[in-house]
Amino acid sequence: MNAHLPVGVLLLLATTGGAQTRPASADFKAEIQKLADDWRQAFNAKDVDKLASMFTTDADLLAPRGDVRGRAAICDEYRKVTAEEGAKLSALTVTRAVRSGSFAYITGTYAGTGPGPGGGTQSDTGHFVSVLKRIGGKWLIAATASVPLVEK
């Protein structure tokens, strides 16, 4: 499960991009967080078509259990993670958002549960980074990676 919880944080964003690189304003970050909350709801509802629509057609999902390329393959992966494995996302927090022209990146943290060894469930927390591309007036995920936290 830890490979896929944060991916959608970068969803469809309806903001105007600026010409220079700049950290997120409070309004931009709040808007991104609202969209992250919407993504979390779609993930928990197992709405894989909505999740997949938030990616570019050639997006990359870089995760500990393997890389996935393309919207259709990402849709299949989310179907497996949400429906077959029962992953749930309890928190998705955007900690930083930077944009420049038609590109942006976001970092943040996630928490959830998923299948554990022996058939039970286990907690999963970690960090993510995602690259967005503005296409047709919307921000779509072009690449995303997650890093689960490891207990020390």
Image: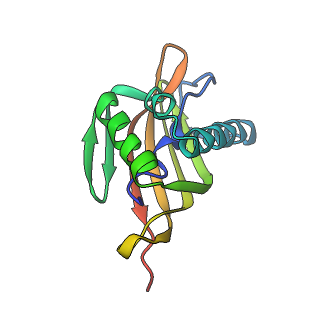
Relative horizontal placement of residue 30, taking residue 137 as reference (left or right): right
- Residue 140 lies, in percent from the top left, at 47, 28
Instruction: Indicate the quadrant where residue 97 lies.
Output: top right
Quadrant location of the C terminus?
bottom left
The residue at 48%/34% (across/down) is 51
Q: Which colour scheme is used?
A: rainbow
Residue 44 horizontal/vertical position (percent): 57, 46
Tell me where residue 69 appears, x and y as whole percent: 26, 36
Identify whether 77 is placed above or below 63: above
Q: Residue 96, how many percent across, how many down?
A: 59, 50
- Quadrant in which the N terminus appears: bottom left
Which is more toward the observer, 122 or 53?
Answer: 122
Q: Which of 101 and 74 is in front in this view?
A: 74
Q: Can residue 58 be seen in this view?
A: no
- Tell me which corner region of the image, top left, top right, bottom left or bottom right, holds residue 17: top right
Q: Is residue 120 above or below residue 102?
A: below
Image side of residue 55 versus residue 98, left or right? left
Q: Is residue 35 visible?
A: yes
